[in-house]
Image (tube, grey):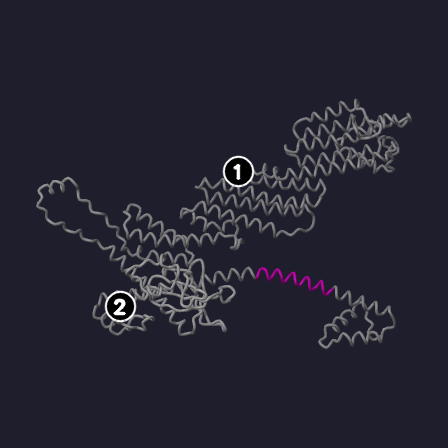
Amino acid sequence: MALSLGEGGGGSRLRRQLESGGFAAGEYVKQLSQQSDGDRDLQEHRQRIQALSEETAQSLKRNVYQNYRQFIETAREISYLESEMYQLSHILTEQKGIMEAVTQALLLQADRDDPALGARRAAAAADPFLPLSAKDAAANEEGRQRTLTTLLEKVEGCRDLLPESPGKYLVYNGDLLEYDADHMAQIQRVHAFLMNDCLLVATALPNRRGAYRYDALYPLDGLAVVNVKDNPPMKDMFKLLMFPESRIFQAENAKIKKEWLEVLEETKRNRALSEKRRLEQEALPRPAPTPPESTNPFDEEEDEDEPSAEEEVVDLSLEWIQELPEDLDVCIAQRDFEGAVDLLDKLNEYLADKPVSQPVKELRAKVDERVRQLTDVLVFELSPDRSLRGGPRATRRAVSQLIRLGQSTKACELFLKNRAAAVHTAIRQLRIEGATLLYIHKLCHVFFTSLLETAREFETDFAGNNGCYSAFVVWARSSMRMFVDAFSKQVFDSKESLSTAAECVKVAKEHCKQLSEIGLDLTFIIHALLVKDIKGALQSYKDIIIEATKHRNSEEMWRKMNLMTPEALGKLREEMRSCGVGNFDQYTGDDCWVNLSYTVVAFTKQTMAFLEEALKLYFPELHMVLLESLVEIILVAVQHVDYSLRCEQDPEKKAFIRQNASFLYETVLPVVEKRFEEGVGKPAKQLQDLRNASRLMRVNPESTTSVV
């Protein structure tokens, strides 16, 4: 048959045929039906196509998984790169403004040094840029203030925000369209009012022509303007950066956009120069006014009694003080946090013993605004949204500067939130695969290593802030709760065996003891959080043992065990020796016989195994639960032996039952008591009473388990 395929090369030919560009399913099926010898050939061909489909699906799944991991990593890097580009753009804008301000300052200094040159430059220069009056040189300051008042009467809610001052006037205004910075979707139409010291943004009121509502007010000192490259249909746009937010606006055309960019930069430069000149004038010493001569002869005596105390003038004309706000802006933009805090410390040290005059208050107000910006940047550095790949040491820089700024409480809170997010992310990224114990080893290593690193870093960063240590203890408890949730979900909720649960708890305790290296003991916390789950596991396993014992009791024939081979007998001896039964040889006979019942031997092994695993889980809160579980388990066997001894009529079987009872009372129960005392550290009176009173129990003949 033309289309018959072998197992090897046929599969590859079939794949090439199905992947060819001119493949037609209808023609292929028609041809296959005509050339097949019967239903069997069609079934075989269908199986080959099905196998090829499954192979393709598996290959596709593997490729999707690999590409998905690469996609996640790429997305993280793109997000990080985007934030870096934004910061770089802001830095370049600030550098441009600084260079223009320096150039303007040099020109003004040259004009002061050479008045003739300044006069020629002033005559050649154009009139100041005043868009509202179209460079009308006759419009004076009073007219500009009147225009500002008239326009602002149309804006609701801004009268209290813009108190009337003799130096405030309107520079430029116009309509703009605002766009969303993330999705570039149009948001609303706004009207912007640029004044000589701030920018007011207002939104249009619906159904009211020409009226606006106040939206936002931005001082020019903290405002940065960035040109947005045209990307049709998005064009004629520019961005305003006001840390920590940014807004994008679109002008009506390219000419208006250019005017906005130029007038904003020009107004910012003029504002900076006027502030500098004002500080220089305020720093100059003022001569004290000469009091008029008095003809009163008693004035001289009063003047002699009161010493003339001249108010100390704070010299703010120093170059580093005048440039301090701009230097702080540069340090913040360049992420030089240490340099910014050093400048603040230098200013505080300089003004520590100086009187608080009006110029000092104004300087403080400007500096406080930069301090808020610096604090916001440092807070953002510690936010959980930032990359967590650097570990706890990556936060040291921001934490130390916040502490120097007097924000130790906020630094502590943000540091612990950052580390909580890092620990949560590390636990969530652990893949649950393989044996439970292997996963618990990984979980404990990741969690307790992170906790230990966090504790050491906390001790380094907050060594001088003892009040923050209580916050760390609270954080450690909440982190331990998160760890126990993941631990319990994998160990106890999945119904693992008691031996596996005991090994997992043992691993967690051993890792928890590592924290004692730094004086941190969280063992009691992990005990308190695990006690409920461990109690449930002990009671569940106790119920399993009781049910298994009852089932064996119901099938009990009271016959000796025949292990058939010496190897099996030797293995049983080793098992009983590991259980603590050292005199087991006296219960063995010839030819691999054991003079004990299978039920009693199985009960002994199961009870001792339960006790060993439970002691691995033991801590004081579990004492009564473990003791009561042991008593319940032992009672089932004791009652069954006692009941069988009373009910059995055959003398031989009765003697055999007595031998099993002797083994149970005189060997097994003392071993249980001894091992319990070794593991717990104190004897169990309940077990002693149970052994001593076991022969005095009265049993209801209608039941094999009830004590009356």
Q: Is residue 56 magenta?
A: yes
In what quadrant of the picture does the C terminus appear?
top right
List x then y, in percent, for residue 639: 80, 28
Q: Closer to the N terminus: mark 1 or mark 2?
A: 2
Residue at numbered disc 2: 140
* Spatial CA span between label 1 and label 2: 74 Å
Magenta stretch encompasses residue 546: no
Look at discs 1 and 2 and give the one toward the viewer.
2
The residue shown at (52%, 65%) is: 183
Q: To which quarter of the image does residue 625 belong?
A: top right
Q: Quadrant of residue 556?
A: top right
Tell me the element at label 2: loop
Give the residue pinned by disc 1. 519
Residue 1 at x, y = what percent? 85, 74
Q: In screen coordinates, is 455 left or right of 673? A: left
Query: Which amino acid does the dot numbered 2 rest on?
Result: Asn
Residue stretch in magenta:
55-74
Quarter of the view holding residue 97:
bottom left
Say which element carries label 1: loop
Q: Residue at x 78, y 24 (%)?
A: 694
